[in-house]
Amino acid sequence: EGQLVESGGDLVQPGGSLRLSCAASGFTFVRYSMNWVRQVPGEGLECLSYISSSGRTIYYTDSVKGRFTISRDNAKNSVYLEMNSLRVEDTGIYFCARERTRDGFDIWGQGTMVTVSS
Amino acid sequence: AIQLTQSPSPLSASVGDRVTITCRASQAINTALAWYQHKPGKAPKLLIFDASNLESGVPSRFSGGGSGTDFTLTISSLDPEDFATYYCQQFNAFPQTFGPGTKVDLK
């Protein structure tokens, strides 16, 4: 069926950096676009970043543009989110999700918690 | 960015009730809309894609409809396992925004 497992979440001070990883298994990773989605405590879901199957097309939401970088390694079946200049408001659960041909995120990881606090 | 609004929020209902959640887009998005169910501590679950197509394995009590700017998610008879938060998401343009969510709780 397919599985995604995130890792790398941690407690970090404001202004710090963190790198999240998402390992895929059970499906042909190279065929799918991938996304990072955040849920801030007590709030809803926010789509942060998108990367196409080849890695050539990338999008960011405005709140993370210039601070976060998405990348993928198709040889390792993994997608990454490099987060710099972290702010308190970046605190939340970070999910990676597989996108199925522009119609839905059909496989999600369980999420990894990022806490930005001094 | 395309904005999505949802109503009502929250939604209080009883087991067996028919419930309908509405999602409205700030501009026309054809049928490029999905619905998800999210429970605390779990991964969101895709229910409906392309506005009205039921995802494989999702119970038939869930249905979606609409096009353009106005969409609905209907649960024909609320099951105890359906108490959760429901989100719509548009795929017409980047960023692929979510609605603010509708929490369905017990009346």
Image: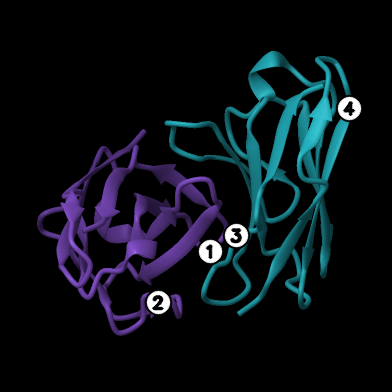
Give me the C-alpha separation between circle 3 and circle 4.
24 Å
Which residue is identified by label 1? A102
Residue at the image point whose x is 58% and y is 34% from the top: B56
Does A27 sit left or right of B27 as displayed? Answer: left
Which residue is identified by label 2? A60
Residue at the image point whose x is 41% and y is 43% from the top: A107
Residue at the image point whose x is 39% and y is 51% from the top: A97
- In the rendered view of the protein, which quadrant contains the C terminus of chain A? bottom left
Which residue is identified by label 3? B98
Q: Are marks 1 and 3 in contact (CB under 8 Å)?
A: no
The chain assigned the colour cyan in the figure is: B
Q: Quadrant of residue A17?
A: bottom left
Which residue is identified by label 4? B18
Q: Are marks 2 and 3 in contact (CB under 8 Å)?
A: no
Q: Secondary structure at mark 2?
A: strand
Host chain of mark 1 = A
Amino acid type, mark 2:
Tyr
Of badges 4 and 1, the one in the foreground is: 4
Badge 4 and badge 2 both on one subunit: no
Give me the C-alpha separation between circle 1 and circle 3.
14 Å
- Could you tell me if residue A34 is visible in this image? no
Give me the C-alpha separation between circle 4 and circle 1.
30 Å
Q: Residues within 10 Å of mark 4 (few under 14, many from 20)?
A: few
The chain assigned the colour purple in the figure is: A
Of badges 1 and 3, the one in the foreground is: 3
Image spot of residue A59 (x, y percent): 40, 78
Host chain of mark 4 = B
Does A118 sit left or right of B81 as displayed? Answer: left
